[in-house]
Structure formats: structure tokens, C-alpha cells
Image (cartoon, grey):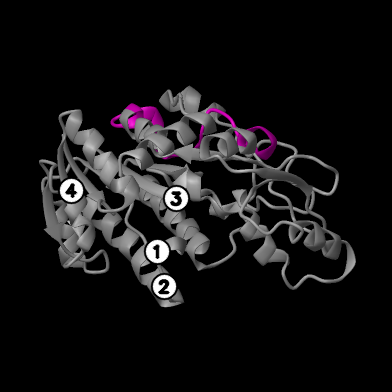
Amino acid sequence: MQVLITGITGRVGAYLAQTLTDDGHQVRGLVWAGDPNTERLEELPIDLVEGDLTNVEDVRHAMKGIEIVCHLGAAFQAGGPFTHDDYFQINVGGTFNMLEAASEQKVQHFFFASTDAIYKKYPVDGLNQPIREDLMPRKETGWYALSKVLGEEMCISYFRSQRVPVTIFRFALVFATDEILNFRQFYLNYWQNLYAQRTTGTAAETRKDLFNHQTEKLVVARDKNGRSYQKHVLDVRDLVRAFQSSIGKKQAMGEVFQLAAPEPFAWETTIPYLAQSLELEYIDLCLFDQTPTFYQFDLGKSKEKIGFQPKYDVFNTIDYALNYRSKT
């Protein structure tokens, strides 16, 4: 099938392009002029079209003859700095242009990349119930999350009013290549910086414990009650499997699906494994006066409706990252 990928030079887009070409699809990518990351696509049999999501004619040109759209392109938190206007023009206006062109082209399937940043995942005591797409209220903070909420609303509106066959994927935090090895919240230095100016109350006790260590170490992070931090993330290989399992499925259209790993990971089991792999020491610490990370997603809907069966837990992701790093 003829597939258009926006954001194709990003870490997710490039991996998706590789997978879809391997599956026999004809892939086209919309890239901005002068994008240096096109180099990572040089070995792939794909068609790159230069243009801008905010330019209606560029989008229409890229959409000609397309059957499947994977709309990943966006201004996002880690790629900036972006202004408020950038988030609106690129993420909201760009998505509007994509949906308009997709409606005109009568595409067979339109995938929109959203994010778990739209959830309020960090209450004072963590979340004790898994997050479901239809039950967790959206509590977006910041322009990126707001732009994705508006994008989702437009997608559902176009599905209902224009019959554009839209599927929305909400990504958990995605790890590709060796990124998990650099995840800041695993490292002592991150917590030392966070607590550096916190010299009163119970936070001062944590600060003292943190600064008792001078060399870089890993940290088993716990909340004030000793409960290990817990987070639910997503390996890029599983993310791509979601696209593969959903293309053309009627039951996926007009729906929102959360994507994540088979299970969340806990710091208390992950850090010892990572420490051994990286030959680093680790400490085990309760972090007082700090909102904990403790949440997971309910993937029941994704499994039932699109057959999403994620394979890669945090240990698989770490092993992949170590292997990748050894070859680069």
C-alpha cells in the first residue's frame, strides 16, 4: 500500500519506515527542506517529499495517491525549543491540514500519534488504578499536551463528520536505540540536581543522603512509604507492531488506543539489573517531599480490538540498548 509518514526522520518515524518497507509497503515521507536527519533514511527505498505541515499545498502534494497516513510529525517537548505559536501552528494547524488533505484524498486509514502526557499521571501518592483510555480524565499541562488534545478532538470530528477513518495512538514514553541507558531518573546526578536547593523540612534529609555520594551511581527511587517507583513505557519495536497490526482494521477506526510495554517496570528490580549491566553501583533511597512516579496502563482495549501484543519489557529494552551501544 502507499503510505505517507510525517516525522519520518525522527527516531520513531525512521524505524516505522524501515518496518513498513520490509513489509512491502511503498513509503513516502514528508520532510522539511534541509532536514539533516534524512541521512538515516538513505538506505531505504522510500520517496522523500520536501514540505511543511503548516503549508496546505505542501501537504496536499505529499498526500497525492496515498492510502495510509501515519501522522507522527509534531513540535514536541524534547525537540525544541518551541514557542506557544509553534505548538499551535505545527501540531494543531498541521494536523488540520493533514486531515483536510486526507479527506480530499479519501485515504483508507489515518493514524494520529498522541501522547500519555495528556493524563494527570503524577498525583501526590501515585496512581493505584491502571489508566484506561475511557476512564482517565484528560488533565493536560503545557502547550505540547494541549496541542495533542486538540489534535485528538479534530481527528474524532473528522471521523464523525467527514468519515475519515482515523485511529489515535497514545504513546507511553518511547525508548529507541540506547535511550533507556540515558534515562535521567535512574541516575544519582539527576536527583542531586533536583534536591540541590531544598534545604528545609524532610527534603533536607533526602538531600543529605543524596550528597553523601560523590561518584555517579544509580538510584532505586522510593516514595516516602518505601514503595518503589513504577513507570510504564514503550519500546519502539512494540510501537511499530501496533501499526502493523492495525492497518486497515475497521474496528480500529474512530478509536483511541493506549500503547505501552507488556507491563510497567519498578525501579527496585530494574536498577540492580541495569547496574550490573553498566558496572555501576546503586543506592536505595526514599525520596521525601517529592511527587512519586507510580502508574501503569490498562492495555485491554488495545489487545482486544487491534490484537496489540507487546513483547518487550524493560529488561529486553535494556539488552537491546546495550547491544546497540556496543555496535556504535
- Is 138 colored magenta in this rendering? no
Contact? badges 1 and 4 (CB < 8 Å): no
Image x and y of residue 5, in percent: 24, 48
Kindly identify the amino acid type of the residue bearing the numbered disc 2.
Answer: Phe
Residue farthest right in this picture: 201
Label 1: state its secondary structure.
Answer: helix
- Is 266 colored magenta in this rendering? yes
Image x and y of residue 230, in percent: 67, 40
**Residue where numbered disc 4 is placed:** 41
Q: CA distance from mark 1 to mark 3?
A: 16 Å
Residue in view at x 45 percent, y 32 percent = 319
Kindly identify the amino acid type of the residue bearing the numbered disc 1.
Answer: Gly
Image x and y of residue 254, in percent: 41, 40
Residue situated in front as seen by the camera: 312 or 320: 320
Residue in view at x 68 percent, y 48 percent = 293
Left or right of 212? Residue 58 is left
For the magenta stretch, what is the residue range?
A: 245-270
Left or right of 27? Residue 161 is right
Left or right of 252? Residue 71 is left
**Residue where numbered disc 3 is placed:** 114
**Residue where numbered disc 1 is placed:** 79
Kindly identify the amino acid type of the residue bearing the numbered disc 4.
Answer: Leu
Which sits earlier in the primary sequence, circle 2 or circle 3?
2
Contact? badges 2 and 4 (CB < 8 Å): no
Left or right of 113? Residue 327 is left
Which quadrant holds the C terminus?
Answer: top left
Mark 1 closeness class: few <14, some 14–19, many ≥20 residues within 10 Å: few
**Residue where numbered disc 2 is placed:** 82
Residue situated in front as seen by the camera: 214 or 169: 214
Contact? badges 1 and 2 (CB < 8 Å): yes
Mark 4 closeness class: few <14, some 14–19, many ≥20 residues within 10 Å: some
Instruction: Please determine whether, in this image, residue 203 is positioned above or below residue 113.
Output: below
